[in-house]
Image: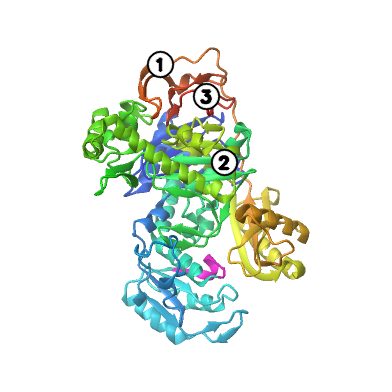
Amino acid sequence: MMEAASASWRIGVDVGGTFTDLVLVGPDRGVRVFKVPSVPADPSQGVLNALQRAADSEDLPVGRLLASCSLFVHGSTVATNTVLEGKGARVAMLTTAGFRDSLDIRRGARDDPWDHRTPYPPVLVPRQLRLPVRGRIDRTGQESEPLSDEDIGTALKVFREQGVEAIAICLFNSFSNAGHENAAAEAMKDFPGGFISVSSEIAPIIGEYERSSTAVLNAYVAPRTLSYLRSLNARLGELGLSSPMLLIQSNGGVVSVSELGDRPVTLLLSGPAAGRGALQFFSEAIGSADLVSMEIGGTSCDVILMSGGEVGFTDLLDIGGYKCASPAIEVHTIGAGGGTIARVDAAGLLQVGPKGAGAYPGPACYGLGGRDPTITDAHVVLGRLKAGPYANGAVTIDGDLAARAIEEAVAMPLGLPLERAAAGMIQLMEQKLLHAVQRVSSERGHDPRRLTLVAAGGAGPLHAVAVARPLGSQRAYVPRLSGAFCALGMLHADVRHDYVRVFFDKLDSAEVEKAETVFRQLERQAKATLAREGFAATDMRILRALDLRYIAQQWDITVLADTAFDRAAIRRDFEREHERLFGHIQPGGSIEITKLRVQAFGHIQRLEKVDAKRATGEAESIERRRVWIDAVTGWTETPVYDGASLHAGNVIVGPAVINEMTTTLLVGRNDRMSVDASGNYSIEISR
């Protein structure tokens, strides 16, 4: 893989809910973007359609393009959508006697303590398929009761009769001794479904519910996800791809299909997590390592915060109400995108989202049969988007259809003029976007005034200044390739693997040699994995980390540690992070270690920044049209610019509209937009 990394073409493909984005980086370091409608029924078809369009643009057969491709990275929502749509496998669960209902009981707490009525999502394994077995590992990892072969045999018989497709094995205390789980997996390896998810391999952590939920999620998504990925990988190989297809993981790194193995649960944030690589790529051009991205596509908005060049991580995801204990980039997602549907509820109030129009039929203005008014339709009515071909010809916008949808479903029921109804939809949408950005910034101890808001996705730049202004940000930044933000970020990500081991000890009196032994075991495992993927020792980077907490606390904080195991430095880093998160520390408090971690990276050649063409004159608009800027400015004759004619050094004072190949940018009144040396748009927010 490392040899191939210096060859000609590099391809990143992001399959979204509405569009499939492909970024092609050529030998000349030039970046090309291709956008085609996604095919929800068969996402691989969207990938192949995008490849065909890319090959046609270079006047090459698809096979020849793939044969000279050094890096092919894929991000997909297949695993996530399998959960959200309830289309996973028929899963059975093997659990320790006495714990049959732990999956149903959950933690017994609600995210909203005042909401006692909303039901939990249905348990992914019905009770008749959650079968207990006798046998017990105690908290020290010792066997207190032998595993019952008879119970395993009985369960296996039931699973065969019930047509089970996947089995999750979740036995008590398996994080400290996986012997019983491994024995059960061996006994069941020949069951007809063929897929077994072992909790001690998927999530070797304390927390019976979280570990079980993660193993069940893994089993639930595995048949559909692995079938799709292996089929696509084989198809690409048949077409000529010589290097292995890599997959973007929830942790922001990439992994080969072979090393992914039977752990598709690590792909639940595949796609959005590539925003980390994109932020790292653009941070140099921005000149800041304190950024917050707001990527808005057709169906959702993904928000990621980078502070001091680092993006936050979490060990516990919530996917459709199901808990998943897997290392992941902190991505806050809300149902707000260009295809988000507006409606008037029974109380006569305007509601926006979370339901969206999806890839098909899409917004009403696309003319594909959609009748519900969407945010895209509102932008069309307000003059921000113009009728005609859009997204490089992927769709054609019809203004009359947009106006009719909003008039019938929003304006008439509310008794409002058409433009006020459309503006109200936008205003409500932007309030939700603001709250989403505040959720990852001010609510977590970050001052948003020091952050640059990076607006991305096909719809993000239309809302950039409207969110940055009330947020308090001094600047908004819009990449020229905004509409392919994550696809580009995939090509700026390293291979990454995370390893964790439960380890309880007090920081001040920890047995350093014992911890060192565990770290070395995890490091050997990490290096062996990277070596199988073709990395030389010089291209590997191994980091150690500790999970820490004050005695009796429930939540851990992860802190990096060097090989010297400097207790004072570890305490200092822990207390600094604790104070940022919670506003206080316990001076001299007793700190305990709960887990040891190893983060392993295989270096992939980074994308290189290319200086843009310098402007030789003032920016000239291609037309002027009536555009609704905001509630204060209202309608105004606004200059419209073709992004292709804007070069480094051009400056525009708003209001203005800029049409790009993959997005449209709205510059607010008195905001100052300049094109930087990289060819991207930097906007100083007026006050």
Residue 198 visible within the image: no
Residue 673 numbered tag: 3
Instruction: Give the mark, 1 or 3, whose residue is nearer the N terminus.
Output: 1
Whether residue 564 sits left or right of residue 127 in the image: it is right
Residue 622 numbered tag: 1
Quadrant in which residue 483 is drawn: top left
- Whether the residues at callouts 3 and 2 have beta carbons within 8 Å, the answer is no
Q: Nearer the viewer, mark 1 or mark 2?
A: 2
Q: Which residues are magenta?
A: 196-206
Label 2: element kind: helix
- Amino acid type indicated by mark 3: Met
Measure the alpha-carbon separation of dots 1 and 2: 35 Å
Please state the horizontal and vertical placement of residue 236, each as a whole percent of the image: 44, 46
Instruction: Give the mark, 1 or 2, whose residue is nearer the N terminus.
Output: 2
Q: Is residue 458 magenta?
A: no
Residue displayed at 56% across by 70% down:
206
